[in-house]
Image (cartoon, rainbow, N blue to C red):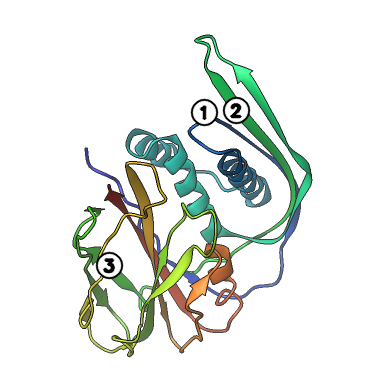
């Protein structure tokens, strides 16, 4: 079965605040293979998605829902939906109301179902997006499915000179940072691109490995690509995608972004 990958591109500019206060709910049901913490993290993610939909009216198309439900399964489908939402909205404030509600239910077959419910109050601000066909790039990966030890490579085509940066996003990480700068790096320092096409890596190897702490058979990771008309001072790591986004979304720079998803099999 083919995996359908999402490739999105936006130009971001700073606009007056249009933040809206919303109240949202998230509920996640899971079995004993998923920890209580992970279950409540997923409930919080659902609450944030609910807040985004209420705050800016964002919905996921029926076509996208059908694709991800057939290919990725429920949890990955929801993660991709929230990933999409982060490009359209900015959370200026999130408050968890009361303690998460944790309970269990006995199913008809005797199995135990664990439930976590979370209510939040959030300030949601839409991000104005402007397409500029004269400031663009396209990315092609050598594969979208990898095993440990495989090497990841990519070709990027440009229609304009730009400063180009790549981040690796690990959404499954529950502790520590989720976003790491992949390019430029100590072996590939120059990220001002004047060529129409480049191949990466050109002086390094991007080797794929499967995290030992993950018990699942496969995981999804993302590469997040940013092109800017002026250099931006990036950190080597960020807490999550929203933390990274805060580094450029209010700048005066023109920034083009895209991302690619890939899967690693144990």
Q: Secondary structure at mark 1?
A: loop
Please state which of residues 265 and 167 is positioned toward the viewer in this rendering.
265
Q: Secondary structure at mark 3?
A: strand
Residue 266 in picture, x, y percent from top left = 27, 47
Q: Residues within 10 Å of mark 3 (few under 14, many from 20)?
A: some
**245 left or right, relative to 210:** right
Mark before the other along the chain sequence, 3 or 2: 2
Viewer-nearest of labels 3 and 1? Answer: 1
Please state which of residues 238 and 22 is positioned toward the viewer in this rendering.
238
Residue 84 in picture, x, y percent from top left = 48, 53
The residue at which mark 2 appears reads as 114
Mark before the other along the chain sequence, 2 or 1: 1
Distance Cα–Cα, label 3 vs label 2: 41 Å
The residue at which mark 1 appears reads as 31
| Residue at the image position 24 percent from the left and 75 percent from the top | 157
| Residue at the image position 43 percent from the left and 86 percent from the top | 229
């Amino acid at each position: 079965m083919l995996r359908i990958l999402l490739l999105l591109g936006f130009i971001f500019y700073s606009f007056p605040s249009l933040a809206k206060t919303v109240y949202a709910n998230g509920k996640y049901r899971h079995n004993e293979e998923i920890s209580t913490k992970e279950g409540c993290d997923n409930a919080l993610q659902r609450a944030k998605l609910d807040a985004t939909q209420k705050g800016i009216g964002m919905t996921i198309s029926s076509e996208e829902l059908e694709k991800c439900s057939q290919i990725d399964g429920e949890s990955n489908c929801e993660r991709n939906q929230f990933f999409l939402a982060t490009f359209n909205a900015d959370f200026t404030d999130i408050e968890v109301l009361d303690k998460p509600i944790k309970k269990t239910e006995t199913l008809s077959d005797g199995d135990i179902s664990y439930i976590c419910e979370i209510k939040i109050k959030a300030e949601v601000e839409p991000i104005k997006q402007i397409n500029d066909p004269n400031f663009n790039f396209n990315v092609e990966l050598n594969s979208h499915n990898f095993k440990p030890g495989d090497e990841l490579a990519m070709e990027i085509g440009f229609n304009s000179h730009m400063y180009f940066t790549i981040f690796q996003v690990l959404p499954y990480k529950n502790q520590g940072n989720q976003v790491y700068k992949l390019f430029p790096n100590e072996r590939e320092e120059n990220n001002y691109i004047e060529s129409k096409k480049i191949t990466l890596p050109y002086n390094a190897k991007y080797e794929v490995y499967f995290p030992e702490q993950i018990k699942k058979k496969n995981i999804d990771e993302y590469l997040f690509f940013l092109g800017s008309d002026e250099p931006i001072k990036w950190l080597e790591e960020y807490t999550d995608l929203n933390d990274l986004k805060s580094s450029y979304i209010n700048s005066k720079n023109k920034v083009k972004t895209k991302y690619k998803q890939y899967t690693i099999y144990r």
